[in-house]
Image (cartoon, rainbow, N blue to C red):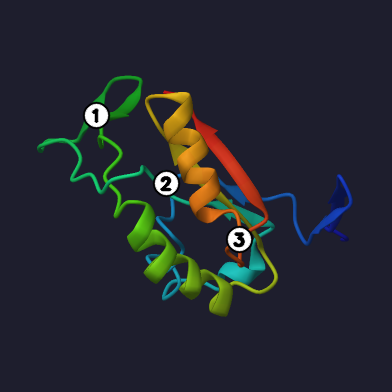
């Protein structure tokens, strides 16, 4: 079965992509499976400044499933550039990667895009507007 597909001129080896935040920045799941077997993944959302997120409990179950309120915990723009993206560029060579960005204002989104635009190792951005 051929799973490769092309979208906007970009080859994806599989139509399976992990949604934002489900695998952090990739390193968190790399010991469990080869990220390069995926079509791609979307990183945890990045904000201009580091965020510790919400206090526990962050997850709760209910009859219809579960709810989470992590609070966009992330290392911030500079740490993402220095630590997270170099790891992705070195270790994720076949899967497509999108970096999720979160901001409260248009200028924060522009600052994030400008701060990451020249970095390698990812295909594009997802805007987290929640």
> Which residue is disc 3 drawn over?
118
- As helix, strand or loop, the secondary structure at mark 1 comes to strand
Could you tell me how far apart the alpha carbons at marks 3 and 1 are, in whole angstroms?
A: 41 Å
Dot 1 or dot 2: first in sequence order is: 2
Which residue does the image show at 42% across and 34% down from the upper left?
108
Dot 3 or dot 1: first in sequence order is: 1
Which residue does the image show at 61% across and 60% down from the upper left?
118
Res. 1 image quadrant: bottom right
Q: Position of residue 61 (x, y in %)?
A: 24, 29
Q: Is residue 69 left or right of residue 36?
A: left
- Mark 1 Cα-neighbour bin, 10 Å: few <14, some 14–19, many ≥20: few
As drawn, 12 above or below 32: above
> Which quadrant would the C terminus be assigned to in this image?
top left
Q: Is residue 102 left or right of residue 55?
A: right
Res. 29 image quadrant: bottom left
Q: Position of residue 94 (x, y in %)?
A: 70, 70
Of badges 1 and 2, nearer the viewer stands 2
> Which residue is disc 2 drawn over?
21
- As helix, strand or loop, the secondary structure at mark 3 comes to loop
> Which residue is disc 1 drawn over?
61
Of badges 3 and 2, nearer the viewer stands 3
């Amino acid at each position: 079965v051929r799973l490769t597909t092309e979208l906007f001129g970009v080859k994806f080896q599989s139509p399976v992509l992990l949604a934002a935040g489900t695998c952090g920045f990739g390193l968190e799941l790399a010991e469990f499976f080869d990220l390069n077997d995926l079509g791609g993944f979307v990183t945890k959302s990045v904000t201009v400044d580091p965020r510790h997120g919400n206090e526990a409990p962050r997850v709760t179950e209910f009859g219809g499933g579960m709810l989470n309120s992590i609070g966009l915990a992330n290392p911030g723009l500079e740490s993402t550039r220095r630590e997270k993206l170099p790891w992705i560029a070195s270790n994720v060579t076949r899967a497509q990667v999108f970096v999720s960005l979160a901001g409260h204002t248009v200028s924060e989104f522009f600052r994030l895009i400008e701060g990451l635009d020249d970095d390698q190792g990812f295909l594009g951005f997802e805007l987290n507007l929640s």
